Image (cartoon, rainbow, N blue to C red):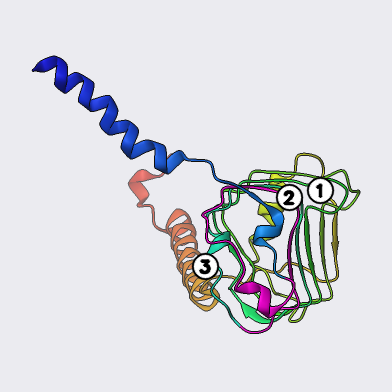
């Protein structure tokens, strides 16, 4: 009986773990859409490894495209160009690696109201192209998360080169509250310093003085 239990446990773990770590390879064309019509032709497979460039072009309005959610590695470039009002439809939340060839690893160009989703797992980006990231001619110019600059910079295998026509900016969190706390702390510190100075000069009793 015990031997049967010992044999059953590895089989149970295999059933539970294998589907989670399964590798599903797809061609870049299966995840590419060059028009609104081709969105309906995107693969329904949960691709983890993509061979070839991914083209997302000439799309209009928000769409449901879950085929990008499971992608972990792209052996090619991700090119998003000439889209309008996609919002956060394009989400590579599990992307870890981009190994591009002759094109920049990431090309985001001529998009209107695009908010690209990139997860924090991105850790390796490489391309033979002199430009690592090409991000230009988008509106509004703050069309990616402000944290992306740090993520892109740290993920690049070599020193990354950005071609961008805008600056990544950050907004202080609860700026007014921090300013108020800083002002209160400054005033309290000033008053405490005045009290200590006054006590040091005039607060000692005569018996404490040494002649």
Q: Residue at x 52, y 69 (%)?
A: 182
Q: Which label number is shown at residue 169? A: none
Q: Residue furthest top?
A: 3
Q: Which residues are magenta?
A: 34-61
In the picture of the structure, the residue carrying the numbered disc 2 is 153
Q: How crowded is the residue under tag 2: few (<14 C-alpha within 10 Å), some, or many (20+)?
A: some
In the image, is residue 53 above or below residue 83?
above
The answer to whether residue 155 is above or below residue 43 is above
> Which numbered disc flags the more N-terminal residue, 1 or 3?
1
Indicate the secondary structure of the residue bearing disc 3. helix
Q: Residue furthest front?
A: 41
* Residue furthest right as drawn: 130
- Left/right of residue 38 with respect to residue 81 in the rendered view: left
First reached walking from the N terminus: tag 1 or tag 2: 2
State yes or no: discs 1 and 2 in contact (Cβ < 8 Å). yes
Query: In the visual, does 103 lie left or right of 141?
Result: right
Sequence-wise first label, 2 or 3: 2
Q: Which residue is mark 1?
A: 160
Instruction: Mark yes or no: residue 16 visible.
Output: yes
Query: Disc 2 on helix, strand or loop?
Result: helix
Camera-side residue of 9 and 103: 9
Asked if residue 211 can be seen in this view, the reply is no
Q: Main secondary structure of the magenta part?
A: loop
Q: Nearer the viewer, residue 127 or 173?
A: 127
């Amino acid at each position: 009986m015990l031997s049967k239990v010992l044999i059953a446990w590895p089989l149970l773990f295999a059933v539970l773990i294998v589907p989670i770590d399964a590798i599903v390879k797809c061609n870049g064309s299966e995840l590419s859409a060059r028009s609104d019509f081709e969105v309906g032709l995107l693969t329904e497979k949960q691709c983890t490894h993509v061979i070839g460039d991914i083209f997302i072009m000439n799309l209009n309005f928000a769409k449901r495209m879950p085929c990008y959610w499971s992608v972990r590695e792209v052996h090619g470039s991700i090119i998003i160009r000439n889209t309008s009002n996609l919002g956060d439809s394009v989400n590579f939340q599990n992307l870890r690696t981009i190994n591009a060839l002759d094109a920049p690893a990431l090309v985001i160009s001529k998009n209107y109201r695009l908010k690209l989703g990139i997860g924090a797992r991105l850790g390796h980006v490489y391309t033979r192209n002199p430009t690592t990231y090409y991000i230009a001619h988008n509106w509004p110019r703050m069309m990616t998360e402000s944290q992306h600059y740090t993520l892109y910079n740290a993920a690049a295998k070599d020193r990354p080169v950005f071609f961008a026509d805008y600056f990544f900016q950050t907004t202080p969190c609860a700026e007014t509250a921090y300013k108020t706390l800083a002002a209160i702390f400054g005033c309290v510190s000033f008053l405490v310093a005045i009290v200590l100075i006054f006590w040091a000069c005039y607060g000692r009793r005569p018996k404490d003085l040494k002649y």
